[in-house]
Amino acid sequence: MPVAASEDAYLVTVQLGATATAQLWRNDECVFDGAFVHGAIAIFDLSDRWSEHFRSGFDFLSFHIPFDTLARSSISLGFSGVREIACEIGVTDPVLLSLSLSLLPALENPAAANKSFLLQVQNAIVSHLLHVYAPIERAAPARGLLSPRQEELAKDFMRANFNRSISLEETAQACGLSRSHFIRAFRNTTGSTPHRWLLDYRTERVKALLATAMTIADIASACGFADQSHLNRVFQKTVGLTPTAWRRQFAPRPR
C-alpha cells in the first residue's frame, strides 16, 4: 500500500513496539527488505513514490515534516536553509525513540497536553534530525570544544532523558566521546557543566508543568528529581522561589 501521496515533505517513522518485518519500494525499486527493531527509524522523502508491505504487526509513531518547515528551522540553527535529511532505513536512534515516547501521554489525552512541552519536543526532534541526518560537512571543532553536532547530540540526549537519572558516561557516549573529554569540552563550549545544564532544563520543564493541575510531587517525578524535597531545593536555588510560590505568582491557572 502507498506510504503517502507525493508531496514536498518528509515522513519520519519510529518503531515503538517489537520487531516488524517489511518490504519498502521507492519509485518501484525495492530499497528495504528486513526488520524494524525497537527504536528503528526510516526517513521517507514524499516527493518520491513509496509503497510498503508488512509481513507482521507494527507500532510506529510518524512525524510529517514539510520541506519548508525543515528549511525554516534549519536557518535558526545555522544550517542556511537545509531541506534534505536522509538515513539508512532501519537504523536505530535512541534519542529519537526517547523523544517519541515522551509524546505518548499527550497523544493519548490531547485535551490535557501541555502545549509548551509539545513545542519543546517538536523543536528537539527537528533539531536532532538536522544535526544527525542532514548531509552537511562541518569544519573540525576548535581544540577542547565540542563540534556543533556533538553539542546538539549531547543536548538532545539530555532533553530526551530529562525525566530519569542519566550518567555522564551515557551522555558522553551519545556524542562519541570519553567521559573526561566530554565534561571538559561541554563546559568549554557552553560555559556550563552537563549536570548544571540538565538541572536548568529540568527547571524549565517544571515551570511548564506548574501551569497544569499536576501536584508538585508528580511534577518532581515527571522531571527526574528524586522527590519533592529535591525539586524544592533545586528550584529555589535556581529561581529564588519554591515551586508552590512560583506557581502562585507566575503560572497561569490551569483550565
Image (cartoon, grey):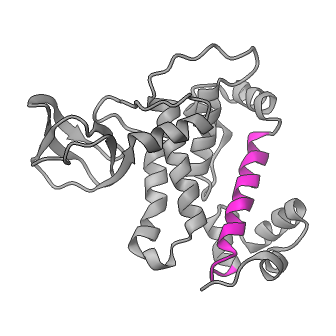
| Quadrant housing residue 164 | bottom right
Q: Position of residue 178 (x, y in %)?
A: 65, 25
**Is 51 situated left or right of 13 in this image?**
left
Tell me if residue 203 is in the magenta stretch. Answer: yes
Q: Picture coordinates of residue 234 (x, y %)?
A: 82, 62
**Residue 157 appears left or right of 179:** left
Q: Is residue 227 above or below residue 103?
A: below
Q: Is residue 76 above or below residue 253?
A: above
Name the residue nearer the viewer: 127 or 240.
127
Residue 89 image point, x, y percent? 28, 33
Q: Residue at x 13, y 42 (%)?
A: 51
Viewer can see residue 163:
yes
- Is residue 93 rendered to the left or right of residue 158? left
- Identify the residue at image location x=68%, y=70%: 220
Q: From which residue to which does the magenta span run?
A: 193-215
Q: Residue at x 28, y 43 (%)?
A: 37
